[in-house]
Image: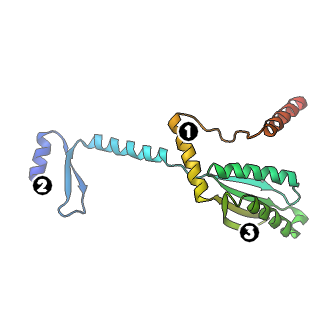
Amino acid sequence: MTVDQARRAAAERELDLIEVAPNANPPVCRIMDYGKFRYEQRKKAKEAQRKSKQTEIKMLRCRPNTDDHDINYKMRNARKFLVRGHKVRFTVIFRGPELRHKEIGEQQLKLFIEGCKDLASVENYPRMEGRRMVMQLEPLPEVLAKAKSVAAEAEAKGEVLEELPPDDAEDVEAVQGVEEAGEQRS
C-alpha cells in the first residue's frame, strides 16, 4: 500500500498512521490510536521496571580492635544478606595509630571471606581507600537463583518477605534486651 493510501485509510477510520519499523524494507506502518499506543508502551515500561529488582549493596563496618563475637555477629548478618541475594561491602575503619597495623584489618576481611565462601565470591578484594580497607562480596549464581525463586514464590502467594527476620531465639532475646535497656535509661 502506498503512503497516500495508508494515510487515507487512517483518516477514514479516524486513527493515526504510525511507523513501527522504519529500518525494514519497505518500512512497516500501522493504523492505530497513537495516544492508546503510548499509554500501553508506558504501562509495559512501568511493569518491566517494577519486576526488575536492583541488587542492593549492604554495608558492614568494623574497626581493627573489634571483638571476635562482634565479628561473628556481623558475619551472620552478612550471610543473611547474601542468602537474600544482596551484595555485601565490608569496611574496616582505621583511626590514628591503628593505621600502622593494616594486617589486622586484612585478617578480619579474610575471616569474612572464609565465613561466607559457601555463599559468595569476592567481587573486590581488600584494598585501602584512604583510612578504610574495603572489600565486596557478591552471592554465587546458585544462591542468587534460589533467592529469586523464593522471592517469586512469596510474591505469588501474596506474602511480603521481611527484611531480616530473627532466625533464632537468641536474636529475639538480644533485641528485647537492648530495647529494655534503652527504656530503663530514658
Q: Which residue is mark 3?
A: 127
Name the quarter where the N terminus is drawn.
Answer: bottom left
* Rendering coords of residue 115 (x, y %): 76, 58
Q: Earlier in the sequence, mark 3 or mark 1?
A: 3
Q: Amino acid at mark 2?
A: Val
Q: Which residue is mark 2?
A: 3
Q: Amino acid at mark 1?
A: Ala
Q: CA distance from mark 3 to mark 1?
A: 38 Å
Q: CA distance from mark 1 to mark 2?
A: 51 Å
Q: Earlier in the sequence, mark 1 or mark 2?
A: 2
Name the quarter where the C terminus is drawn.
Answer: top right
The image's mark for residue 154 is 1
Q: Residue at x 65, y 50 (%)?
A: 83
Nearer to me, 39 or 158: 158
Q: Earlier in the sequence, mark 3 or mark 2?
A: 2
- Nearest to the eye among marks 3 and 2: give it: 3
Residue 19 lies in what quarter of the image?
bottom left
Q: Amino acid at mark 3?
A: Arg
- Nearest to the eye among marks 3 and 1: give it: 1
The image's mark for residue 57 is none
Classify 185 as above or below 121.
above
